[in-house]
Protein backbone atom coordinates (compact mmCIF):
# COMPACT_ATOMS: atom_id res chain seq x y z
CA UNK A 1 0.00 0.00 0.00
CA UNK A 2 1.43 3.38 -0.96
CA UNK A 3 2.14 5.90 1.76
CA UNK A 4 1.40 9.52 0.80
CA UNK A 5 2.94 12.64 2.35
CA UNK A 6 -0.50 13.58 3.68
CA UNK A 7 -0.37 10.51 5.89
CA UNK A 8 2.77 11.47 7.80
CA UNK A 9 0.68 12.23 10.87
CA UNK A 10 -2.95 12.55 11.89
CA UNK A 11 -4.61 15.87 11.09
CA UNK A 12 -6.42 17.78 13.86
CA UNK A 13 -9.74 16.68 12.35
CA UNK A 14 -8.70 13.06 12.91
CA UNK A 15 -8.40 13.58 16.67
CA UNK A 16 -11.08 13.97 19.30
CA UNK A 17 -11.30 17.33 21.00
CA UNK A 18 -10.68 17.43 24.74
CA UNK A 19 -14.41 17.80 25.29
CA UNK A 20 -15.20 14.83 23.05
CA UNK A 21 -12.55 12.67 24.74
CA UNK A 22 -13.87 13.65 28.17
CA UNK A 23 -17.45 12.82 27.18
CA UNK A 24 -16.33 9.44 25.87
CA UNK A 25 -14.48 8.62 29.09
CA UNK A 26 -17.52 9.59 31.13
CA UNK A 27 -19.76 7.42 28.94
CA UNK A 28 -17.49 4.41 29.43
CA UNK A 29 -17.34 4.96 33.20
CA UNK A 30 -21.11 5.35 33.31
CA UNK A 31 -21.59 2.12 31.33
CA UNK A 32 -19.34 0.24 33.78
CA UNK A 33 -21.18 1.57 36.82
CA UNK A 34 -24.58 0.92 35.23
CA UNK A 35 -23.82 -2.68 34.23
CA UNK A 36 -25.97 -3.74 37.17
CA UNK A 37 -28.04 -1.15 39.05
CA UNK A 38 -27.17 -2.57 42.45
CA UNK A 39 -23.46 -2.22 41.72
CA UNK A 40 -23.35 1.57 41.86
CA UNK A 41 -25.59 1.71 44.95
CA UNK A 42 -23.54 -0.86 46.81
CA UNK A 43 -20.13 0.81 46.41
CA UNK A 44 -20.56 2.66 49.68
CA UNK A 45 -21.59 -0.29 51.85
CA UNK A 46 -21.26 -3.60 49.97
CA UNK A 47 -17.76 -5.06 49.42
CA UNK A 48 -19.13 -7.37 46.69
CA UNK A 49 -20.12 -4.33 44.62
CA UNK A 50 -16.44 -3.49 44.19
CA UNK A 51 -15.73 -6.92 42.72
CA UNK A 52 -18.68 -6.42 40.39
CA UNK A 53 -17.11 -3.16 39.24
CA UNK A 54 -13.83 -4.98 38.59
CA UNK A 55 -15.64 -7.52 36.42
CA UNK A 56 -17.55 -4.82 34.54
CA UNK A 57 -14.29 -2.91 33.98
CA UNK A 58 -12.67 -6.09 32.64
CA UNK A 59 -15.46 -6.53 30.09
CA UNK A 60 -15.18 -2.87 29.08
CA UNK A 61 -11.41 -3.17 28.68
CA UNK A 62 -11.73 -6.30 26.55
CA UNK A 63 -14.32 -4.65 24.32
CA UNK A 64 -12.39 -1.40 23.88
CA UNK A 65 -9.26 -3.42 23.08
CA UNK A 66 -11.18 -5.32 20.40
CA UNK A 67 -12.62 -2.09 18.98
CA UNK A 68 -9.16 -0.51 18.91
CA UNK A 69 -7.69 -3.37 16.90
CA UNK A 70 -10.64 -3.45 14.52
CA UNK A 71 -10.48 0.33 14.08
CA UNK A 72 -6.79 0.12 13.25
CA UNK A 73 -7.44 -2.61 10.70
CA UNK A 74 -10.16 -0.44 9.19
CA UNK A 75 -7.83 2.57 9.00
CA UNK A 76 -5.16 0.47 7.32
CA UNK A 77 -7.69 -0.92 4.83
CA UNK A 78 -8.74 2.67 4.08
CA UNK A 79 -5.16 3.48 3.08
CA UNK A 80 -3.74 5.14 6.21
CA UNK A 81 -0.11 4.57 7.11
CA UNK A 82 1.34 2.98 10.22
CA UNK A 83 2.92 6.36 10.92
CA UNK A 84 -0.53 8.00 11.03
CA UNK A 85 -1.86 5.23 13.27
CA UNK A 86 1.15 5.43 15.57
CA UNK A 87 0.76 9.18 15.81
CA UNK A 88 -2.77 8.78 17.19
CA UNK A 89 -1.60 6.11 19.63
CA UNK A 90 1.41 8.12 20.77
CA UNK A 91 3.88 5.46 19.64
CA UNK A 92 6.26 5.04 16.72
CA UNK A 93 5.32 3.61 13.34
CA UNK A 94 7.41 0.52 14.07
CA UNK A 95 5.80 -0.02 17.46
CA UNK A 96 2.30 0.32 15.99
CA UNK A 97 3.06 -2.17 13.23
CA UNK A 98 4.64 -4.67 15.61
CA UNK A 99 1.73 -4.48 18.05
CA UNK A 100 -1.20 -4.32 15.67
CA UNK A 101 0.12 -5.68 12.38
CA UNK A 102 -1.92 -8.45 10.81
CA UNK A 103 -0.75 -12.01 11.30
CA UNK A 104 0.75 -13.62 8.20
CA UNK A 105 -1.92 -14.90 5.88
CA UNK A 106 -2.16 -18.59 5.34
CA UNK A 107 -1.22 -20.12 2.00
CA UNK A 108 -2.24 -17.88 -0.88
CA UNK A 109 -4.29 -20.46 -2.74
CA UNK A 110 -5.66 -22.15 0.36
CA UNK A 111 -6.61 -25.80 0.46
CA UNK A 112 -9.65 -26.87 -1.54
CA UNK A 113 -12.27 -28.64 0.50
CA UNK A 114 -12.84 -32.29 -0.18
CA UNK A 115 -15.31 -32.56 -3.07
CA UNK A 116 -18.16 -35.04 -3.09
CA UNK A 117 -17.69 -38.13 -5.31
CA UNK A 118 -18.30 -37.24 -8.93
CA UNK A 119 -18.02 -33.48 -8.34
CA UNK A 120 -15.03 -31.38 -9.43
CA UNK A 121 -12.83 -30.03 -6.65
CA UNK A 122 -13.46 -26.39 -5.82
CA UNK A 123 -10.71 -23.98 -6.80
CA UNK A 124 -9.48 -21.14 -4.66
CA UNK A 125 -7.78 -17.88 -5.48
CA UNK A 126 -6.80 -14.66 -3.73
CA UNK A 127 -8.25 -11.29 -4.68
CA UNK A 128 -5.59 -8.72 -3.90
CA UNK A 129 -4.75 -5.92 -3.34
CA UNK A 130 -8.08 -4.77 -1.94
CA UNK A 131 -9.06 -1.91 0.32
CA UNK A 132 -12.17 -0.49 1.97
CA UNK A 133 -13.14 1.35 -1.21
CA UNK A 134 -12.76 -1.28 -3.92
CA UNK A 135 -13.32 -4.64 -2.25
CA UNK A 136 -17.12 -4.77 -2.55
CA UNK A 137 -16.93 -4.03 -6.27
CA UNK A 138 -14.35 -6.80 -6.63
CA UNK A 139 -16.54 -9.23 -4.66
CA UNK A 140 -19.60 -8.34 -6.74
CA UNK A 141 -17.70 -9.10 -9.93
CA UNK A 142 -16.26 -12.33 -8.50
CA UNK A 143 -19.70 -13.38 -7.25
CA UNK A 144 -21.21 -13.12 -10.74
CA UNK A 145 -18.58 -15.58 -11.91
CA UNK A 146 -19.31 -18.06 -9.12
CA UNK A 147 -16.61 -17.10 -6.61
CA UNK A 148 -17.51 -16.62 -2.93
CA UNK A 149 -15.45 -15.55 0.09
CA UNK A 150 -14.20 -18.28 2.41
CA UNK A 151 -11.57 -16.25 4.32
CA UNK A 152 -10.06 -12.78 4.35
CA UNK A 153 -7.23 -10.79 5.81
CA UNK A 154 -5.34 -7.53 5.38
CA UNK A 155 -5.82 -6.28 1.80
CA UNK A 156 -7.10 -9.60 0.43
CA UNK A 157 -10.02 -12.01 0.21
CA UNK A 158 -9.71 -15.75 -0.35
CA UNK A 159 -12.50 -16.90 -2.68
CA UNK A 160 -13.68 -20.32 -3.83
CA UNK A 161 -15.31 -21.33 -7.09
CA UNK A 162 -18.83 -22.72 -7.44
CA UNK A 163 -21.31 -23.37 -10.30
CA UNK A 164 -23.71 -20.58 -9.24
CA UNK A 165 -23.55 -16.86 -8.54
CA UNK A 166 -23.12 -15.30 -5.11
CA UNK A 167 -23.81 -11.96 -3.50
CA UNK A 168 -21.81 -10.41 -0.70
CA UNK A 169 -22.52 -7.78 1.94
CA UNK A 170 -20.31 -5.88 4.35
CA UNK A 171 -21.69 -4.57 7.64
CA UNK A 172 -19.99 -2.32 10.17
CA UNK A 173 -20.00 -4.05 13.58
CA UNK A 174 -23.50 -5.56 13.25
CA UNK A 175 -25.55 -5.98 16.41
CA UNK A 176 -26.74 -9.38 17.58
CA UNK A 177 -30.22 -8.58 16.30
CA UNK A 178 -28.87 -7.57 12.90
CA UNK A 179 -26.81 -10.76 12.70
CA UNK A 180 -29.91 -12.80 13.49
CA UNK A 181 -31.90 -11.03 10.78
CA UNK A 182 -29.14 -11.66 8.26
CA UNK A 183 -29.12 -15.38 9.10
CA UNK A 184 -32.91 -15.54 8.75
CA UNK A 185 -32.59 -14.10 5.25
CA UNK A 186 -30.13 -16.76 4.17
CA UNK A 187 -26.93 -14.81 4.64
CA UNK A 188 -23.90 -16.75 5.88
CA UNK A 189 -21.30 -15.00 8.04
CA UNK A 190 -17.75 -15.45 6.76
CA UNK A 191 -15.51 -16.12 9.76
CA UNK A 192 -11.84 -15.25 9.17
CA UNK A 193 -9.12 -17.63 10.29
CA UNK A 194 -7.08 -14.98 12.11
CA UNK A 195 -7.98 -11.45 11.04
CA UNK A 196 -9.92 -8.95 13.17
CA UNK A 197 -11.86 -6.60 10.90
CA UNK A 198 -14.11 -3.64 11.62
CA UNK A 199 -16.56 -5.19 9.17
CA UNK A 200 -18.51 -8.41 9.07
CA UNK A 201 -18.72 -10.04 5.65
CA UNK A 202 -21.74 -12.05 4.56
CA UNK A 203 -22.49 -14.14 1.50
CA UNK A 204 -25.42 -16.07 0.07
CA UNK A 205 -25.88 -18.07 -3.14
CA UNK A 206 -28.16 -16.93 -5.96
CA UNK A 207 -30.34 -19.15 -8.09
CA UNK A 208 -28.36 -18.18 -11.17
CA UNK A 209 -25.61 -20.06 -13.03
CA UNK A 210 -22.15 -18.57 -12.74
CA UNK A 211 -21.11 -16.44 -15.67
CA UNK A 212 -18.03 -17.64 -17.55
CA UNK A 213 -14.73 -15.86 -17.14
CA UNK A 214 -12.59 -14.51 -14.30
CA UNK A 215 -10.28 -17.53 -14.45
Image: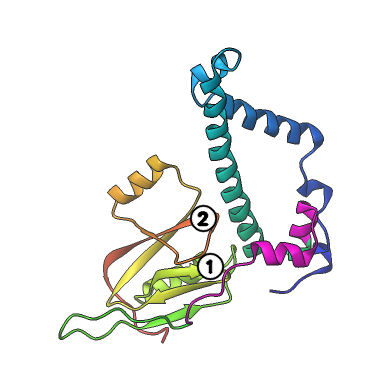
Picture quarter with the C terminus: bottom left
Q: Which mark is residue 199?
A: 2
Picture quarter with the N terminus: bottom right
* Left or right of 47 on screen, residue 158: left
- Crowding around mark 2 (Cα neighbors within 10 Å: few <14, some 14 to 19, many 20+) is some
Tally of numbered tags: 2
Front-most of residues 131 and 212: 131
Relative height, residue 188 to residue 176 (above, below): below
In the rendering, at what x and y percent does residue 116 appear? 18, 80
In the rendering, at what x and y percent does residue 145 appear? 37, 77
Residue 89 lies within the magenta run: yes
Residue topped by disc 1 = 135
Residue 79 visible to an observer of this rendering? no
What residue is rendered at 51% in x and 22% in y?
48
Question: Of the residues tagged 2 and 1, which is closer to the observer?
Answer: 2
Front-most of residues 16 and 101: 101
What residue is rendered at 77% in x and 59% in y?
86
Please report the bounds of the magenta region as a residue range: 84-107
Q: CA distance from mark 2 to mark 1?
A: 12 Å
Relative height, residue 57 to residue 185 (above, below): above
* Left or right of 185 on screen, residue 15: right
Q: Residue furthest left?
A: 117
Amino acid sequence: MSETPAEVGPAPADRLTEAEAGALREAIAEAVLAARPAGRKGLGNDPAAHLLTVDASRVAAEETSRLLRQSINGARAAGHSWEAVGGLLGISRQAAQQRFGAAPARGAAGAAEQAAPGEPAARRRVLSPLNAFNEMQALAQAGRHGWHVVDYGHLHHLVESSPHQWEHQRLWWPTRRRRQRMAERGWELVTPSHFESPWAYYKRPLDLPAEPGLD
